[in-house]
Image: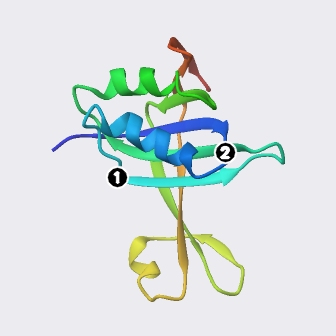
Amino acid sequence: MTQEKVVRILGYYHDASYLERIASNLRKLLVDIDWIYGKKINDEGLYEIYMGIPYTNNFEIAVANLSKTVEVEKVEVLEDAKVEPYIASHDGTIRRGSEEEWNDGENLIIYVPVFSKVVGYSWGDKYSKNLH
């Protein structure tokens, strides 16, 4: 079994080809994507995308190449990330929960990564930082 890495991508979304470029950049090196979550950061089109990617031999090369992709500002590997599930219910309340609670078909589960170490890539240059 391979260990999953959580990757955060910051970039400017203008059309659907942005997501296609990210996925194809990973797939051309046979790197799979287990899950994907994104959100808009500002009105200029900056988006933050989180991905669960199984660690393989091509992982580092794929991430370095991804950081050189057009409209991608930086790519960060959240080294010690744990993904915490939160439940957003239909009445607007958000609470910490589990996937079992989500299966009722009425609620939405949101995965929030919690981490303290980041290895980042920007245009192929690598950097590392501890947040705590």
Q: How many marks?
A: 2
Question: Decide: marks 1, 2 in contact (CB < 8 A)?
Answer: no
Q: Residue 53, how many percent across, how many down? A: 35, 42
Q: Which mark is residue 7?
A: none
Residue 82, above or below 69:
below
Residue at mark 1 to residue at mark 2: CA–CA distance: 21 Å
Answer left or right for 39 relative to 50: right
Residue beneath the point at 55% across and 76% down: 108
Q: Which badge, 1 or 2, is on the more N-terminal residue?
A: 2
Above or below, 62 against 105 in this view is: above
Front-most of residues 120 and 93: 120
Which residue has dot 2 on it? 13
Residue 38 is situated, as x and y percent measured from the top left of the image, at: 59, 53
**Taking 83 as reference, is 129 left or right?**
right
Badge 2 crowding class, 10 Å Cα cut-off, few under 14, some 14 to 19, many 20 or more, is some
Percent across and percent down for residue 51 are: 46, 46
Element marked by disc 2: loop
Is residue 8 positioned above or below 74 on the image?
Answer: below
The percent coordinates of residue 85 (x first, y second) are: 50, 63
**Amino acid carrying mark 1 in the image:** Asp
- Give the residue at x 72% y 80%: 92
- Name the residue rendered at 30%, 44% in the picture: 32
The nearer-to-camera label among 1 and 2 is 2
Q: Looking at the picture, tell me which residue is in the foreground, 114 or 123.
A: 123
Residue on which disc 1 sits: 34
Q: Residue visible at 50% across and 14% down?
A: 124
Q: Nearer the viewer, residue 13 or 110?
A: 13
Looking at numbered disc 2 in the image, what kind of residue is underneath it? Tyr
- Placement of the N terminus among the 4 image quadrants: top left
Q: Quadrant of the C terminus?
A: top right
- Badge 1 local density, few (<14 within 10 Å), some, or many (20+)? few
